[in-house]
């Protein structure tokens, strides 16, 4: 189930600031988007019958009034925060983990977080503000602070390589955007869905040109390699993809023609058959 945390409004050029701005504008305008546009923040819920999992937890109160709506939408869908048993964290950035906690502590009292060890190690080394902090570290530190109550409560499970967390649910290291950026895969028989996290931020631009990086990538070269790997694999195998910042619900499939990729949003189905 896709759950919207809302949107945040940004000048796309400030996100893709190292790209050729003429190309970025051309691709945005050809997709009928303005240079300043709303970007979805999507989370996902997986109910296995015995566990209720979330993929990421939204921006909480850290990115303005357009987002932080995950909890409300979870309730609308018939779940309470206490129902969540596990939260699969794609990476520790402000728009993916801030919703984990509020001023009174853990929002999801019964949940265990699953996080790649390298993202934890990075933030354990940057937990305290320093004069030489990059703006990205300053921006995302409140995200790590929302993880800390779970560390204190012994509610964090870390992994350092590709691993099956539960039957059919695996964590696959796809570092580049952050040191421990992780995608998750869900398998049921022959069917597969991949939760991409931040392998892509601006669909209108980065499917046409996967080499365009975002300002928040910790290793831009690796981020491009990972994006191309993920696109190529999804196009070759035709499975469903769910991506945090593709327009809500952010679920669809990818096709390839030469080195250009096209995103096909999943067909709406009243029966849930796609
Ligand atoms: Zn993000």
Image (cartoon, grey):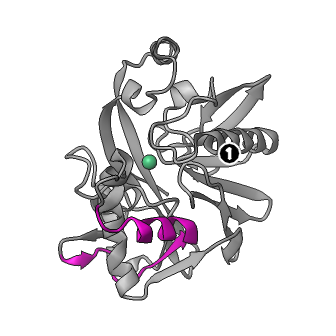
- Looking at the picture, how far across and down is residue 9, in whole percent? 29, 34
**Could you say whether the residue bearing mark 1 is in a helix, strand or loop?**
helix
- Looking at the picture, how far across and down is residue 227, in whole percent? 65, 41
Q: Is residue 74 above or below residue 82?
A: above
Q: Is residue 194 visible?
A: yes
Query: Does residue 79 belong to the magenta stretch?
Result: no
The residue where tag 1 is placed is 226
Query: In this view of the protein, which residue sits in the foreground, 49 or 24?
Result: 24
Q: Is residue 123 above or below residue 261?
A: below
Q: Is residue 241 above or below residue 147?
A: above
Q: Which residues are magenta?
A: 104-129
Considering every residue shown, the one lying at the far front of the view is 131
- Looking at the picture, how far across and down is residue 24, in whole percent? 49, 18
Residue 242 is left or right of residue 65, and the answer is right
The answer to which image quadrant residue 256 occupies is top right
Query: In this view of the protein, which residue sits in the foreground, 116 or 39?
Result: 116
Residue 167 is left or right of residue 71, and the answer is right
Residue 235 is left or right of residue 213, and the answer is right
**Mark 1, residues whose alpha carbon is within 10 Å: few (<14), some, or many (≥20)?**
some
């Amino acid at each position: 189930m896709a759950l919207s945390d809302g949107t945040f409004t940004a000048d796309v050029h400030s996100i893709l600031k190292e790209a050729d701005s003429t190309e970025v504008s051309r691709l945005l305008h050809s997709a009928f988007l303005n240079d300043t546009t709303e970007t979805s923040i999507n989370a996902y819920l997986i109910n296995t019958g015995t566990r209720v999992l979330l993929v990421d937890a939204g921006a909480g109160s850290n990115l303005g009034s357009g987002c932080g709506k995950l909890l409300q939408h979870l309730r609308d869908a018939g779940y309470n925060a206490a129902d969540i048993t596990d939260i699969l964290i794609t990476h520790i950035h402000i728009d993916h983990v801030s919703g984990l906690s509020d001023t009174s502590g853990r929002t999801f009292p019964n949940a265990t977080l699953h996080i790649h060890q390298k993202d934890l190690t990075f933030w354990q080394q940057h937990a305290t503000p320093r004069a030489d902090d990059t703006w990205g570290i300053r921006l995302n530190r409140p995200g790590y602070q929302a993880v800390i109550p779970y560390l204190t409560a012994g509610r964090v499970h870390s992994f350092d390589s590709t691993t099956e967390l539960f039957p059919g649910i695996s964590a696959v290291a796809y570092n580049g955007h952050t040191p421990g950026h992780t995608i998750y895969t869900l398998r049921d028989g022959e069917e597969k869905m991949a939760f991409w996290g931040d392998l892509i931020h601006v669909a209108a631009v980065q499917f046409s040109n996967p080499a365009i990086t975002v300002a928040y990538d910790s290793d831009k070269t690796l981020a491009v390699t990972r994006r191309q790997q993920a696109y190529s694999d999804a196009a070759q195998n035709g499975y469903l993809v769910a991506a945090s910042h593709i327009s809500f619900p952010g679920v669809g499939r990818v096709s390839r023609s030469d080195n250009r990729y096209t995103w096909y949003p999943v067909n709406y189905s009243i029966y849930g058959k796609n």
